[in-house]
Structure formats: C-alpha cells, structure tokens
Amino acid sequence: MNTPAIGQLDFGYPWWLSYGHLAVFAVFATFLLLGFARKWSKWPMIFLGAVATWSAASFLLIHFGLDINGRAPMPTQSFLRSGTGRILDLGAGTGRSSIMVLAARPQATLVASDLFGESFDHHFGHGDSPQERLLRNLKAAGVDQRASIVTADMRKLPFETSSFDAIVSSYAVDHLNRDGITQALAEAARVLKPGGDFLLVLVSNDRWAKLAFGPLLTHGGTRSPSWWDAKAREAGFQVMEQGTSPVTLYLLLRR
Ligand SMILES: C[S@@+](CC[C@H](N)C(=O)[O-])C[C@H]1O[C@@H](n2cnc3c(N)ncnc32)[C@H](O)[C@@H]1O
C-alpha cells in the first residue's frame, strides 16, 4: 500500500481510551515500589500488584489491538477489490475510517458523511467546527482531493438510489437504537449499487473489551455477531465475510 507522507493527524478520541490504563499503571506501580521499600503487608501488595498487572496488560492490548487514535488498518482486503469507484462513509466523524479506505484504495473517491451533532461532540468534544476537524485530517493524510464532506443523517440519506459503488461505516451504526439501525441499513441498501460492498465495522463487547474497560464500552454490547448477521440479511445484504479483532467486529456485506 502506498501511504502518502502525513502531517498531524488528530482523530480526537478521548485520551483515556488510549492512555487511561497507562495512568492507572503509573499510580499503582509507584505505590507497589513504595510498598516494597517500606515492607507493607502481603494483601495490600497483592492488590497493588494485581491492578498494576491488569492495567499494563490492558494498555498493551488497547495500544496494539485497537489504537483508536492511530490510523486504522483495513480489516479485510476483499472490500472494493476493483479499487475504483465512489465510496460513502456513514458516520465519518474525524475521518479515521475515511482515511483507512482512501489510503487502501488510491483510485477511489469518497463522500464522508456525518450528522455532526450531539454524538460527534460526545465522542470528540467541542472545539472547531466538526467539518473543519474532519477536513484537516483528510488533508494531513493527503487524501482530501478525493474526498468531499456532506452533513447527513444515515437514517435518511440525501443521496439517490444506487449512487455509490461501496459503503464503509466504522463504529457508527452501533450508536443507533434498534429502529435507527434498521433505517440505516435500509438506506445503505438503497444508495448502494447492486453488487456493491458494504464494510460494516462495529464495537464489539468481546472478552478484550470486558477485560480492559468493564462496562465502559457498552454500545453494541448486547448485540451478537449473529444479530448483526440477521439484521444485514433482513436489509437485503449477503454476508460475504465476518471477522474480529480486539474490541471490533466487522462484516463485509454485498448488495
Ligand atoms: C465513534 S464515531 C466513529 C467515527 C469514525 N467512523 C471512526 O471510525 O473513527 C461515530 C460517529 O457517528 C456519527 N453519527 C451518530 N449518529 C449518526 C447519524 N444518525 N447519522 C450520521 N452520523 C451519525 C457521530 O456523529 C460520530 O461522528
């Protein structure tokens, strides 16, 4: 893959998702050392050691397995094998998923769509306009010439039927309620050309998520891979591939 030189990417996910465990480790490891030096009794030392071990293991898992503030790898190379065409990103946010597919498919163009509302602020905080933050990242990744930004609700898309060759959506559809998911999948099926690919990436409340975050990452947590499989089929998609990586479930769907 040819990745152009990049400037300063800032996906803007909260610091604690990337470094929270490291902060916990620093505190507990410090007390552990203090405890050794002052010869504290066995049980407090076991407790400090257990939390320090858990936080170090969770940091490594999240850093190397998810790396939410770093560039995302494509979960499957089977997405848009032709390499060309017009892609739609549903819930593009600050551009992590858009940059992922534009870097992997250098002949393709992409429409980065998002509602840029409450959910955006919830994930990325207030600050400059969301569209400017997204554009800055597209420029930093050197893909802005092949991308455009559209404010849109994925439950009611302002695009014509069969107007995209492929769709990507990462960690976004799972933020909707049950009806919203049904609407978004139906809209995706409507705007995608017959035979087009839909790469649906979801937060998975798997054992890694439970180990590292406990109940903090709950969205999608009650929905199993088979639930998503059935929902996608109900919307008229074929499920071509399904896979996991830490905290992530992906489905490659075909219309
Ligand atoms: C966790 S972020 C994911 C951003 C990006 N796809 C990524 O992989 O980093 C979820 C995004 O979904 C967007 N979103 C939530 N509900 C939406 C809706 N109904 N229509 C469009 N976008 C929505 C939010 O604004 C937010 O930017």
Image (cartoon, helix red, strand yellow):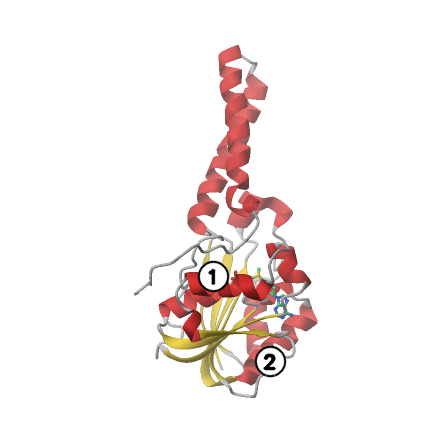
Residue at image position (65%, 66%) is 176
Type of amino acid under label 1: Asn
Residue 137: where, in percent of width, then height?
A: 47, 61
Q: CA distance from mark 2 to mark 1?
A: 27 Å
Q: Looking at the image, in which quadrant does ligand 1 appear?
A: bottom right
x%, y% of residue 175? 63, 63
**In the rendering, which numbered label is found on residue 187?**
2
Task: Tell me if residue 121 can be seen.
Answer: yes
Question: Is residue 125 or residue 8 the one in the foreground?
Answer: 8
Mark 2 or mark 1: which comes first in sequence?
Answer: 1
Measured along the vertical axis of the image, is residue 105 above or below residue 17?
Answer: below
> x%, y% of residue 2?
30, 65
Residue 174 in the image: state x and y as whole percent: 60, 64
Picture quadrant of residue 156:
bottom right
**Secondary structure beneath label 2:** helix
Q: Which mark is residue 137?
A: 1
Q: Secondary structure at mark 1?
A: helix
